[in-house]
């Protein structure tokens, strides 16, 4: 322990304490509350995929360091998935990189591509690790705020254009978007693409919720748009799609020069991870289309169940087009501070939610919004809705 007055945690990370997800999951555990905070399903994914992981462990596949870029079976399955779904062709040997979840893919991309002082434009509210990783890379984050408009949080394209300066290195885009549930439209994405081409920017796109879109929403990968494949690092992960968030298998697809750069950082973060799980995820990616349809249908029903419960309890609900999160406005309940609301909710109602303000630089913009995860059993969601219904007269 140093005796100087110098803080132990360095300046780059000083503003980042414990993540809100860890804080709120701990609160749920100590208060015995229903945890609709951190986004993880309360039932495991497909049995045959778990069995595939067990088989890999038993057969000694992946029990020692897998290859740095990921096992060939998984890289091939990732490339086949991008081709089949989106018509995007990637070479499994030079254009695919397996990472420790999307989290490492984001960190490695930013550490590899951002010079100190570079500006990174990201949609606000933003997933919490973006700000921390931009800071670790020595970059400066420039948020562009999504604002409520006709029942959804929308991007103002003029604001986005105005946020780009000569110091902008990359756009960090997330669609389907956590925490708002917005799925950017083809028109919005085309405008982003035109801007990236015009200003010669790199784009890092976090598409971990690519399969979780509802009703008539369609997920369009930015890399499919004109001029984008060569400048885009596309990130996804098995956690959400297969309901195994603890396995931490993610990936990057990008042209060779970008993959090589991201790998340069990644190899000194974890080097490799999740050996046997990589084989299981390769099988998961090859599941027939029915799997994805059933997953979406199940989550859509859960969304509707929780949305109805929240509305009945008095919240104003932003019905998400994608992800497994609902953002709700607490002002109709006579509240305005999402932080205070979420900290008191376990005691008042036995439910845990996340204050959206943590995902904002402009905290006041996010203050009245809170996020509920609906990737839980129907019974759990019904119980949570009943508990929340007591708030008004609590
Ligand atoms: N990006 C977003 C938008 C997320 O919501 C999450 C996690 N829930 C991640 C990245 C991290 O994914 P992983 O668990 O694969 O690291
Ligand atoms: N992505 C998950 C969420 O938004 C949490 C993952 C984490 O705890 N880092 O809830």
Image (tube, grey):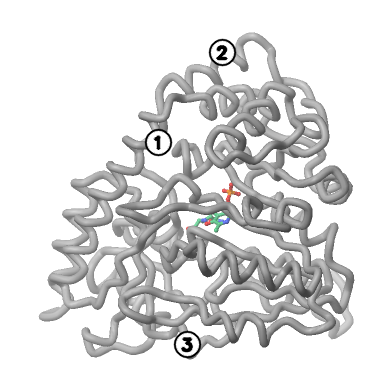
368 w.r.t. 213: above or below: below
| Residue lying farthest to the left in this orientation | 393
| Residue occupying image coordinates x 76% and y 73% | 198
Residue at mark 1: 292
- Of labels 1 and 2, the one closer to you: 1
In the displayed structure, does residue 217 sit left or right of residue 105?
left
**Some atom of ligand 1 lies within 8 Å of the CB belonging to the residue at label 1:** no
Q: In this view, does 156 lie to the left or right of 354?
A: right
**Would you say the residues marked 3 and 2 are in contact, meaning their CB atoms lie under 8 Å apart?**
no
Which residue is denoted by mark 3 in the rendering?
365
Between disc 3 and disc 2, whose residue precedes? Answer: 2
Q: Mark 2 points at which residue?
A: 55
Residue in the picture at 33% in, 54% down: 216
How dense is the environment of label 3, judged by Cα within 10 Å: few (below 14), some, or many (20 and up)?
Answer: some
For mark 3, give the secondary structure.
helix
Residue at the location (58% across, 43% down)?
A: 237
Q: Which residue lies furthest to the top in this view?
A: 59
Q: Quadrant of the C terminus?
A: bottom left
């Amino acid at each position: 322990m140093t005796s100087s007055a110098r803080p132990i945690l360095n300046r780059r990370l000083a503003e980042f304490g414990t993540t809100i997800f860890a804080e709120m999951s701990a609160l749920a555990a100590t208060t015995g509350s229903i945890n609709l905070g951190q986004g993880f399903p309360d039932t495991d994914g497909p049995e045959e995929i778990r069995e595939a992981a067990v088989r890999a462990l038993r057969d000694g596949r992946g029990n020692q360091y897998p290859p740095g870029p990921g096992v060939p079976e998984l890289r091939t399955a990732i490339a086949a998935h991008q081709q089949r779904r989106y018509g995007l062709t990637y070479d499994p040997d030079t254009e695919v990189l397996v990472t420790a979840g999307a989290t490492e893919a984001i960190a490695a991309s930013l550490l590899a591509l951002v010079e100190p002082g570079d500006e990174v434009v990201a949609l606000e509210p933003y997933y919490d690790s973006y700000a921390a990783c931009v800071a670790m890379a020595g970059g400066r984050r420039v948020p562009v705020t999504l604002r409520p408009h006709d029942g959804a949080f929308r991007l103002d394209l003029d604001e986005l254009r105005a946020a780009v300066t000569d110091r902008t290195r990359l756009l960090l885009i997330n669609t389907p978007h956590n925490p708002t549930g917005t799925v950017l439209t083809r028109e919005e994405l085309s405008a982003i693409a035109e801007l990236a081409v015009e200003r010669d920017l790199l784009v890092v796109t976090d598409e971990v919720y690519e399969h979780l879109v509802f009703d008539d929403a369609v997920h369009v990968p930015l890399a499919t748009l004109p001029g984008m494949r060569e400048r885009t690092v596309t990130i996804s992960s098995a956690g959400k799609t297969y309901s195994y968030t603890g396995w931490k298998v993610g990936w990057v697809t990008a042209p060779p020069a970008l993959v090589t750069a991201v790998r340069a950082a990644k190899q000194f973060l974890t080097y490799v991870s999740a050996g046997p799980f990589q084989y299981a995820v390769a099988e998961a990616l090859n599941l027939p289309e029915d799997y994805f349809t059933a997953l979406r249908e199940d989550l859509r029903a859960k969304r509707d169940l929780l949305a109805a419960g929240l509305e009945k309890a008095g919240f104003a609900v932003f019905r998400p087009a994608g992800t497994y999160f609902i953002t709700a406005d607490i002002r109709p309940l006579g509240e305005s501070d999402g932080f205070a609301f979420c900290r008191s909710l376990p005691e008042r109602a036995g439910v845990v939610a996340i204050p959206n303000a943590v995902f904002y630089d402009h905290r006041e913009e996010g203050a009245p919004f809170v996020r509920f995860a609906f990737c839980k059993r129907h019974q759990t969601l019904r119980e949570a809705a009943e508990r929340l219904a007591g708030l008004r007269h609590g």
